[in-house]
Image (cartoon, rainbow, N blue to C red):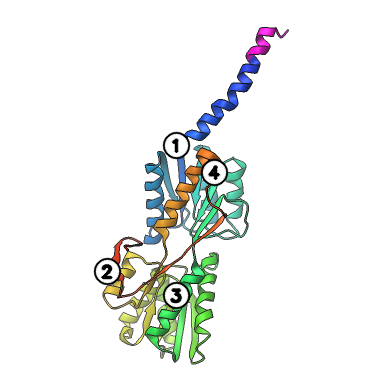
Amino acid sequence: MITKRKTLMLAAIAVAAPLFSGQAYAAGGGLMTIIVNDPANPYWLTEGNVAAAEAKKLGYTANVAASKGDTNTESQLIDTAITNKSVAIILDPANASGSVGAVKKAIAANIPVFLVNAEINQEGLAKAQLVSNNAQGAALGAQQWVKDVGQKGNYVELLGAPSDNNAATRSNGYRSVLSQYPDLHEVGKQVANWDRTQGFNAMQSLMQAHPHIIGVISGNDEMALGAIAALKQAGKLSSVKVGGFDGSPAAVAAIKAGELQYTVLQPVATFAAKAVQEADEFVRTGKTGAKTEKQLFDCVLITKANVDKMTAPFTLSK
């Protein structure tokens, strides 16, 4: 039998529960899980380091893990994030289509997901998708590449991982500019999966098939640096110009050494921190503070003219 006193106590608990829940929700703090691709690449290393530092600054504990571009590993890391009761997940998705399931799994566990660097092929799942403006950056790079190599001759292209939409976006951005020069001919291209060693091997293969090229346009710096190593080994670097994309410390050094013509700086340090800030805002208020889910951050061209302003990894001082 429920007495009047018990009824009043139950009512009081029912009222108090959402109040306690609301207070915890607004306080922030807790574990923020950060999943990057491969920290062996300085770009992804910076992404994870910056996000973790920002999370700690805002009062969270941070756990950085790497999927290495593997969706199975990514799924396991999401499981761990759920088990560890993460309050938010910052994710650089392993695959535009293949990572959708991992994002859905986190959401089903009531953990908000914030994507950085790469997109997934479905909107309305992640609370935010923060990426470089790859089309804008590719156009910048291609315009500079033409200035460096000239408007006539044969060239080759190194492509990033096909599972990453950024690879196609950059390649299409290059083509939108280079197609305006009818005497520039792309005679070969190979996928090198954003990797320096694969870039080296691909460049060796391309040189054998096309010995008389004037330039290499690369989807990222690591592949470009691999190409430079292959060209140096073959004694051809002086006659072949190479352009990159990312703004990595090694690319900055290569520009200063006169081996790389330019790179396109991705503002990874900016959007990695911004993703954490939006996650914090959401944890505390239920809103990200951003106007749109997809947010583009413009890239900046880095050449010998401004390379000395690169004062920290992926950071250009004004």
Is 7 part of what is drawn in magenta?
yes
Please give the label number shown on residue 29: 1
In this picture, residue 145 sits left or right of residue 175? left
- Vertical order, 216 against 90 (above or below): below
Residue type, numbered disc 3 = Leu
First in residue order: circle 4 vs circle 3: 4
What x and y, as percent, mark residue 178? 50, 83
Q: Are marks 2 and 3 in contact (CB under 8 Å)?
A: no
Question: Which residue range is magenta in the image?
Answer: 1-9
- Vertical order, 160 against 292 (above or below): below
Task: Please give the residue where the numbered disc 2 appears in the rendered image.
Answer: 308
Please tell me how crowded label 1 is: few (under 14), some (14-19), or many (20+) other residues with Cα within 10 Å. some
First in residue order: circle 2 vs circle 4: 4
What x and y, as percent, mark residue 49? 37, 51
Depth check, mark 1 against mark 3: the one in front is: 3
Q: Are marks 4 and 1 in contact (CB under 8 Å)?
A: no
First in residue order: circle 1 vs circle 2: 1
